[in-house]
Image: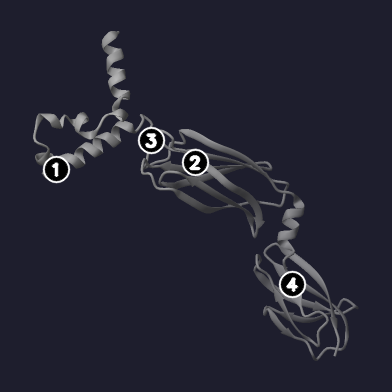
Amino acid sequence: MILEKKQKKSIFSLNNLTIEQIVGLNKFPSHKFKENSMKKNLFLFLLMCFYINVNGQAPGQYLSVISSQATPVQGGVNVNLQTFCSELMYHMEYNYTIVGNQINLSSCYYITPLLLETSLNENFFIPTPNSDNYVVNLTIYTSQSSETCDYSTVQDYRTLTLSNDDFALANDDLKLFPNPNDGVFQIQSENQTIDTIRLYNSLGNLVHLSTSLTNDVSNLEEGIYFVVITTENGNTTKKMALQK
């Protein structure tokens, strides 16, 4: 027991010793140590390895979440995750499962022992079958292995909620302009791919069919028309006034 205590004491007293005392430079001339850069580099490497714990991470390493946000996008959900670490880290992988309206998202990172602050800003796309009131259960892991994520340590957990209204707003980004117009108008969308554009008069008759985002119907009479825009998410109808 006495020997064990002495060993522990000598280990934790390294911070109070000089490099010369640790490596025992008093046993040989100091100029030889300076000339032998390989020995010096080896010592620094061994010293660094000494301070790395059994998990492969240096004491004091941590990963913090700066922000997390789930947003409905075309065809699914995008999760934006911003993280920070006081050491050099990199993202390894992410995976997800969807059970009912629960999206279980896991994101895995590896933290190196190098003292180099790292900030990451990443987006994870998750395709969804419909526009339910989804809940994203986000779990952030770190891995002991630097090659394959082993999801060994949970660093953070977040719950992000999406409603049907959020999806409705995402799908309602279709713009028709100008409106009113003289017969020339454009259709624009940031999140959706526009397939066809159909124009109906007040009697319900189809008077124009196009696949172009810019349309010229100046040959039609003034009045109120209904523009049906077809995308991969379905049909959206907008009222348009034609004034010459």
Q: Which residue is mark 3?
A: 58
Asked if the residue at tag 1 contacts the one at tag 2, i.e. Cβ–Cβ closer than 8 Å, the answer is no
Real-space CA distance between mark 2 and mark 1, rounded to the nearest whole angstrom: 38 Å
Q: Residues within 10 Å of mark 2 (few under 14, many from 20)?
A: many
Upstream in sequence: badge 2 or badge 4: 2
Which quadrant of the structure image shows residue 52? top left
Real-space CA distance between mark 3 and mark 2, rounded to the nearest whole angstrom: 12 Å
Q: Type of residue at label 2?
A: Leu
Left or right: residue 151 versus residue 215 is left
Left or right: residue 197 versus residue 26 is right
Q: Which residue is mark 2?
A: 63
Q: Type of residue at label 4?
A: Lys
**Coloration mode:** one colour
Dot 2: what SS?
strand
Dot 1: what SS?
helix
Which residue sits at x=38%, y=42%?
A: 112
Q: Which residue is mark 4?
A: 175
Q: Quadrant of the C terminus?
A: bottom right
Which residue sits at x=65%, y=60%?
A: 74
- Frontmost of labels 2 and 1 is 1
